[in-house]
Image (cartoon, rainbow, N blue to C red):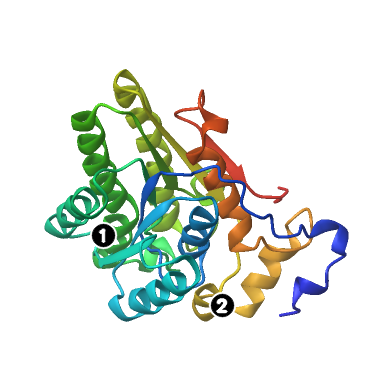
């Protein structure tokens, strides 16, 4: 696949420096290890002044990410705890840690998700259930834990879920992933209505194509080339560009926005 980093510079934005938009806030970010959207979001939150509790199911990658971010932003700004979002006990432990280590919680970013490619006619129950359990039910578990914590604290709060344009747009071989992401969108809207009474906002982002090394490993060069060609800017998004929108949804700039799914995409039909 041709590297679209050579695309006309007019379509590629420069990295935006922090402006203190999340000063004094504490955030939990799931699937935050590595170089994808979760890792980029953790970095952006730290640059905006937040304290971050990193979580991921991959303990070694999480430890590496923790060490890197702590070296750059200070040990007091970053903590981490492995968590498999398919395990309710681990989810509870994660949210208890936010209270124990940081004295409370202000923002939760539900980034954990699992993809895969299989035509529906060949898809097994296990294939279907695994993607739904991580991507949709995992988001449910963490959103439930967040809302319980926010309701008890009575000081508001913010949840940002990571959906996908796949929740709107059909793509062959993605029935399980698309169904899960459409479910995340519906969960976001319903949770927003329920949580509004105690001052909590719940929104979601829906990225199209954000490039990172893991995506390259699990997606063919032909498919990546096809998807990239369908983007209006002729390039994929950088993970930090999606993270910028998550920062917006977590900040006071979106104070009257809840129950929305914000597309982070330049994709045309």
**Residue 202 in the image: x percent, y percent?**
40, 34
- For residue 72, the mark is none
Cα gap from disc 1 to disc 2, whole angstroms: 24 Å
Q: How many marks?
A: 2
Q: Quadrant of residue 127?
A: bottom left
Confirm or deny contact between disc 1 and disc 2 (CB under 8 A): no
**Residue 149 in the image: x percent, y percent?**
21, 38
- Which structural element holds mark 2? helix
**Residue 167 in the image: x percent, y percent?**
49, 46
Image: 105 above or below 138: above
Report the residue marked by disc 1: 129
Answer few, some or many: residues within 10 Å of disc 1's Cα (few below 14, many 20 plus, some between 14 and 19). some
The residue lying at 65 percent from left, 49 percent from top is 265
Report the residue marked by disc 2: 216
Sooner in the amino-acid sequence: mark 1 or mark 2: 1
**Residue 132 in the image: x percent, y percent?**
31, 55
Front in this rendered view, residue 42 or 259: 42
Image: 124 above or below 184: below
The residue lying at 24 percent from left, 66 percent from top is 126
Q: Quadrant of residue 69?
A: bottom left
Front in this rendered view, residue 152 or 90: 152
The residue lying at 60 percent from left, 68 percent from top is 211
- Which structural element holds mark 1? helix
Front in this rendered view, residue 245 or 187: 245
- Discs 1/2, front: 2
Quadrant (top left, top right, bottom left, bottom right) of the N terminus: bottom right
């Amino acid at each position: 696949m041709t590297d679209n980093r050579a695309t006309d510079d007019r379509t590629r934005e420069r990295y935006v420096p922090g402006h203190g938009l999340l000063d004094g806030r504490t955030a939990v970010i799931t699937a935050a290890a590595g170089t994808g959207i979760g890792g980029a979001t953790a970095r952006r939150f730290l640059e905006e002044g937040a304290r971050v509790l990193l979580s991921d199911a991959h303990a070694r990658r999480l430890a590496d990410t923790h060490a890197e971010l702590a070296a750059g932003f200070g040990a007091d700004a970053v903590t981490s705890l492995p968590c498999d979002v398919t395990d309710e006990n681990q989810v509870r432990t994660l949210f208890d840690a936010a209270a124990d280590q940081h004295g409370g919680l202000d923002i939760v970013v539900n980034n954990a998700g699992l993809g895969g490619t299989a035509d529906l006619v060949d898809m097994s129950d296990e294939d279907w259930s695994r993607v739904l359990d991580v991507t949709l039910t995992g988001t449910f578990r963490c959103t439930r834990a967040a809302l319980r914590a926010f309701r008890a604290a009575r000081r508001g709060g913010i949840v940002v879920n990571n959906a996908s344009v796949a929740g709107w747009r059909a793509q062959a071989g993605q029935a399980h992933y698309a169904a899960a992401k459409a479910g995340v969108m519906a969960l976001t809207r319903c949770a927003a209505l329920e949580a509004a009474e105690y001052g909590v906002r719940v929104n979601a982002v829906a990225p199209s194509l954000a490039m990172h090394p893991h995506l390259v490993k699990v997606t063919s060069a032909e498919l990546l080339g096809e998807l990239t060609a369908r983007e209006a800017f002729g390039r994929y998004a950088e993970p930090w560009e999606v993270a910028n929108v998550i920062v917006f949804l977590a900040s006071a700039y979106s104070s009257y926005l809840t129950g929305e799914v914000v597309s982070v995409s330049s994709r045309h039909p």
